[in-house]
Image (cartoon, helix red, strand yellow):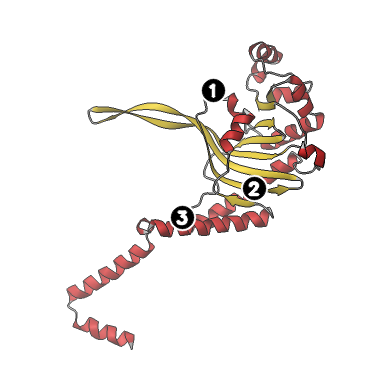
Amino acid sequence: MAAGIFFQFAGKLTPLGLLLVGALALFNYYFLTDERFKPARYKASAADVHLRGINEMVGFIAPGFRFTRSAPQLDALVAKSRLFENFKKIEFVREYGCIAGRMGAADVAIVLTRAGYYREVTETIGNRKVKRKVEEICFDGYLVLADFPRKFDGWVTLAPDHIESRLGWLATEWRELRDQFAVRLENQDFEREFVVRASDPVVAHYVLSASTIEDVLNLKRRLGERAMMGAFFESTLMLAIPEAGTKFALNGDEPTAWLASCEEDAFRLQSMLRVLADMKVGETIWRPEERAG
């Protein structure tokens, strides 16, 4: 019946009218499907759907873990850790996603992080020179935080040793003269890979036991050329593992890319869980008196 009414109506239209009706139908289809015309509310709801999809994937791979858009107090934790003091200048630390949960006896958070500084550039627009600030990214990747089962005061940091490979044992001698926080360890393989700095050498030797050193070396071997960094502070372990590119993005305006990005994110999450397993996170059970202290 509806089809009959339509054809009766169409029969009364001129060719120009039919052309206009077809153009209107085409525009409506284009308006409803093209992402540029989607209102902000639609995009927000699509991002929420994507967020639920990410959490289903996270919960399947790591039961009990959950993805959120932000990580509270990250700036304060990074400052306490002194992790980024290896860089000459860090002016901002931004998180754009956090996967948190428990692994054995430990609380764990995997925070997607970018850190860097601002650089002033001058651009010529017409006859004018305009100055503006651009971001220079020093670190893009994961900050992995977990309970560390030893109680201590102070801090210890690990940074890639780019000088050792060129200067050999002279690098250690030069560093000890230049850096009051530099600490020498007995494990030569570890010293070839990392610069160790600490608030107190006693703290460094206490935290970096033989088993912990071996765990870190095993992790470094698996990560290969990636310049891993680490910090121990306030009974917390923090690892910085670089990985450039978009990760766990909430593509509210590109729903067709969801499945592909979720598949890539699943591999990323499995890789980070292997990092935690390499460091034996959660395997040591805290004693109540240590935890309370």
Instruction: Tell me, yes or no, if residue 208 can be seen here.
Output: no
Instruction: Name the amino acid type tagged 3.
Output: Gly
Residue hosting label 1: 88
Instruction: Tell me, yes or no, if residue 192 can be seen here.
Output: yes
- In the picture, the disc for residue 233 is none
Q: Earlier in the sequence, mark 1 or mark 3?
A: 1
Residue at point 63%, 19% (across, down): 163
- Horizontal side of 222 relative to 99 (left or right) equals right
* Horizontal and vertical percent position of residue 115: 53, 33
Cα distance in 3D space between marks 1 and 3 = 36 Å
Q: How many marks?
A: 3
* Horizontal and vertical percent position of residue 268: 62, 46
Residue hosting label 3: 252
Instruction: State the image quarter where residue 37 is shown.
Output: bottom left
Q: Earlier in the sequence, mark 3 or mark 2?
A: 2
- Secondary element type, mark 3: loop
Instruction: State the image quarter where residue 77 is shown.
Output: top right
Q: Nearer the viewer, mark 1 or mark 2?
A: 2
- Horizontal side of 4 relative to 11 (left or right) equals right
* Horizontal and vertical percent position of residue 200: 72, 20
Residue 121 vertical placement versus 171 (above, below): below
Residue at point 60%, 42% (across, down): 111
Residue at point 38%, 63% (across, down): 33
Instruction: Give neighbour class at mark 3: few <14, some 14-19, many 20+ (Cα, 10 Å).
Output: many
Cα distance in 3D space between marks 1 and 2 = 30 Å
Cα distance in 3D space between marks 3 and 2 = 22 Å
Instruction: Give neighbour class at mark 1: few <14, some 14-19, many 20+ (Cα, 10 Å).
Output: few
Residue hosting label 2: 100
Instruction: Name the amino acid type tagged 2.
Output: Ala
